[in-house]
Amino acid sequence: MRRIFLLLTVVLVAVLGVTFAVHPAEAAFSDRAKDLTKIAGVRIGKTDGNVRIVIDADRPVSYKQSVLSNPMRIVLDIQNAWIAPEAKKNTTVDSALVSGVRVAQFDATTVRIVVETSVGKDGYKIFSLDAGKPRVVMDFGAAPSGSAVKKPAQETMKPVPVQPPQTDDEDVQDADNQDQIDRDLDAITGMKGRKIAIDPGHGGSDSGAIGPTGIMEKSVTLRVSRELKRLLEAEGATVILTRTGDTEVSSKGANATSVEELEARCEIANRANADIFLSIHADAFTNREVKGTTAYYYTKGTKQSKRLADSVRTALIDSIGTVDRGTQTSNFYVVKHTDMPAILVEISFISNPDEEKMMNSPEGIKKIAQGIADGIADYFG
Ligand SMILES: [Zn+2]
């Protein structure tokens, strides 16, 4: 037994060595990515009450697994890997065996998969298939490996790494390790690694709407966008602002037509290949009584755009407590000409004295940004 433990220690040291060797923090992601295994996606299927989770990779993978209790979770760390942005990150599974699967880029070179499960140690099986399309398979159920697994003869099964026998000392170490993994899990959010384009409405020669005391929409949208950028970056996202000062976005400045100006904003998001686009605005109406929050997406927009609009509107209203004017469709240029899920948010009415005051206060700006950030976090799950 001691020999097995020694062997595992050697393997662990070797794996750590490799991890550090390919992990110069300053290397550009694209440089590192080509040396890493791409995890294209995680597929989850149910057959005869069993649950199968398949992790698709672009080359054979090596992985480490660990088990956490209360609640029972199986953690699979795929080494020297990165997760494709389009891969689904959180999945709720309607099964007595598995309740959820979470996938995240745990650090620069590790993709972590966490499976919430009710099965004991004999109730699941993990193996990798390297031939053809490389993948790791996690089977949960009474007879996970039986006739359901029909694999071509040339494919080899790797045994699940053997856990070392536990002594009292190791129990203590294990508890520390579990605490660490729990802390690490808390740090995983759907925001990590996302590219988010934020468009502060108006700017420069275009003030946008002006409130009863003279507060300009262009300054509210910029203050909110800056605070939102700070919050999203703290969660691990990359944020692109279409403008950072009181200026037009088009290189033609004040001479740009309104279409040229809006085109320039879309182009920034499209060129950056952002995951989502949010244009931030404040509403106005001749009747100063009117108040509330509205989210828009393109009339022929995607389900994702609608979901983003709903998530942001709901969370924003939760945060600032105004009237819900719903999610609506529109042909606004910026939601029509952006290539990713895109929305335009009318925070509230700058023409309403109370809402103008709220949007001009530091606390108001914070609440607005936090609400929108919560909505985005909800969208990415
Ligand atoms: Zn506006």
Image: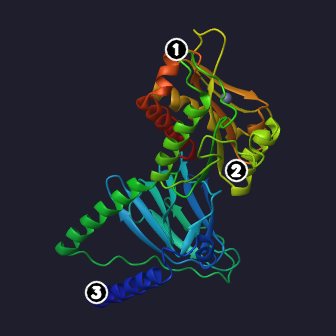
Q: CA distance from mark 2 to mark 3?
A: 57 Å
At which x and y percent is residue 49? Answer: 55, 52
Judge the density around disc 2: few (<14), some (14-19), many (≥20) Cα neighbours within 10 Å. many
- Any part of residue 128 in sight: yes
Q: Secondary structure at mark 3?
A: loop
Where residue 269 is drawn, which disc sits there? 2
As shown in the figure, which amino acid type bears the numbered disc 1?
A: Pro
Q: CA distance from mark 3 to mark 1?
A: 75 Å
61 sits left or right of 98 in the view? right
> Is 1 or 225 nearer to us in this picture?
225
Q: Is mark 1 within 8 Å of ligand 1?
A: no
Q: Which residue is mark 1?
A: 353
Q: Which residue is mark 3?
A: 1
> Which residue is located at x 61 percent, y 40 percent?
246
As shown in the figure, which amino acid type bears the numbered disc 3?
A: Met
Please identify, in this view, whether the residue under mark 3 or under mark 1 is nearer the observer: 1
| Rendered position, 142 above or below 131 | above
N-terminal of the two: label 1 or label 2? 2
